[in-house]
Amino acid sequence: MIDRDFLEWPFFEERHRSLAAKLDRWCASNLTDDEPADTDSACRTLVRTLGDGGWLRYCVPDEQGRLDVRSLAIIREILARHSGLADFAFAMQGLGSGTISLFGTDAQKAAYLPAVARGGKIAAFALTEPESGSDVASIATVAEERDGGFVVDGAKTFISNGGIADFYVLFARTGEAPGSKGISAFIVDRETPGLDDGERIEVIAPHPLATLRFTAMRLPASALLGERGRGFAQAMATLDVFRTTVGAAALGLARRALDEATKRSLTRRLGSGTLADNPVTQSKLAEMVLDVETSALLVYRSAWLRDVLGRRNSREAALAKLHATDSAQRVIDKAVQMFGGLGVTRGVVVERLYREIRALRIYEGASEVQKVVIARAHLADYRP
C-alpha cells in the first residue's frame, strides 16, 4: 500500500490532493509497466494518451502564465510509480518546451505550446554535446548569423526524444562573448534541411535517444528563442524548473520498490516465519522508509519555494535531485537484494526499476554537478 500521507503536508493545496487521486486512478486504468517491443511507437502513443487525458496541460503555463512545479512533481512521482516510460514521455513534453514557456514570444508560444499540451507535437531539449556533457559553457555547436538568419553546424548527443521529436529547442554558440555568455537558444523543426536525427543510442532502460548532427542547417531569424547571447541562462532557468521533478520521478520509483519489497517480505517464507519477521529485513525496510520520506520532504519543499514564495530554487532543486536520485538507487538495490535471484530476472518489477533509476543520477545535471551547486550556494552564505 503506497503511502499518501505526504499529501496532507502544508506544501499542498486541495487541488494537488485532488490531482493526485485522479491521476492515480487514471494510471491504474490506462498504463501498464510492461516494457514495449517498439519504444518509439510506445512513446508516441503515450504522448497522445497523456494529452487525451489532459495531463500534458500541466507541462505548459496556465492562464496566468505560471508553471506549477508542485503539480509537475506530483504527476511525475505518480507516473514513475506506475510506468517509467510514461513518466519519461510526460517529462520531455515539459522540459522540451520549457524554454519556450519561459522565454518564447507570443507567436512562438502559440505555434508550439497548445500542440505540446494536447500531445500533437513531441518536444525535445538539445543541450548535451559529445565533448561537453555537464560543461554547458563549453558547447561547440555554432550558429553563425548569415543572410538574415542563422547557419548551424555541430552535434548534440544523448538527446531524449531524439529521432521522434517534432521540434528541438537547440542551444548553440552565437559568439557574443566567450564561454556561457556567447550561447543562444533556437527552435528547430524536425524537417529542417541540414538536421540529421537518425543516429540512435541504446541504453539499459529503453528510451528514445539520439545523436543530432547539423550540417549547414539554415534557420530563419524567427527561430531565435529569447534574447541572443542569453541561452546559457535560459537553459539553467529551464533546468531549475524541471530539476525538482527529476527528484519526484526518482521518488516514485523508490516508492514502487519499497511497496514491492514490503509485499515480498510479508509473503516470502523464512524458517517458521516470513522475511518481515527477520531483524535484518526490518532494518532494510526502515532504511528504505527513511530514504523515501526525506526525499519527499526535499522534493516538495523545493517545489513549494518556487510556487508559493516565488524564489529561485537552484540550491533546493539540487538538494532534491541529488538526494532523491541517489537514495532511490539505494532503495531499489535493497529491494532487488530482498528478492534474491528473482530480483535480477527480466520481467520482475524491481529488475526494471534497477535499470530505470540509473540514468536519473546523470541527466539534467549529474550528482557531481548537484554537489557543486549546493557547495557554491553554501559557501556564498559565508563569504562577504
Image (cartoon, grey):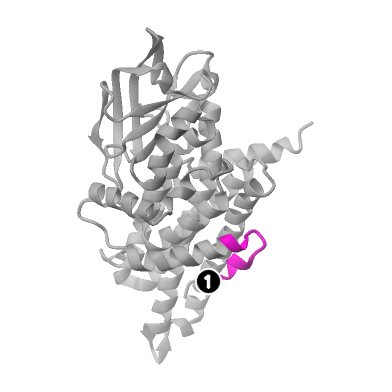
Single out the residue that lies furthest toward the bottom.
272
Q: Is residue 351 left or right of residue 282?
A: left
Examine the structure image and report whether residue 83 is included in the region drawn in magenta.
no
Q: Secondary structure at mark 1?
A: loop
Q: Residue at x 38, y 29 (%)?
A: 129
Categorize mark 1 by other alpha carbons within 10 Å: few (<14), some (14-19), many (20+): few
Q: Quadrant of residue 311?
A: top right
Q: Quadrant of the C terminus?
A: top right
332 or 43: nearer the viewer: 43
The region drawn magenta spans: 3-15
Instruction: Indicate whether 283 appears above or below 301.
Output: below
Instruction: Indicate whether 369 appears above or below 224.
Output: below
57 or 36: nearer the viewer: 57
Q: Position of residue 328 (x, y in %)?
A: 47, 59
Amino acid type, callout 1:
Asp
Q: Position of residue 182 (x, y in %)?
A: 51, 18
Instruction: Indicate whether 321 appears above or below 329.
Output: above
Inspect this view and state whether residue 179 appears: yes
Single out the residue that lies furthest toward the left.
37
Q: Position of residue 75 (x, y in %)?
A: 47, 56
Q: In the rendered image, which residue does mark 1 sit on?
A: 3
9 or 142: nearer the viewer: 9
Q: Is residue 262 left or right of residue 244?
A: left
Single out the residue that lies furthest toward the top.
147
Instruction: Indicate whether 150 appears above or below 37.
Output: above
Q: Residue at x 67, y 38 (%)?
A: 377
Q: Residue at x 39, y 42 (%)?
A: 116
Q: Position of residue 194 (x, y in %)?
A: 26, 21
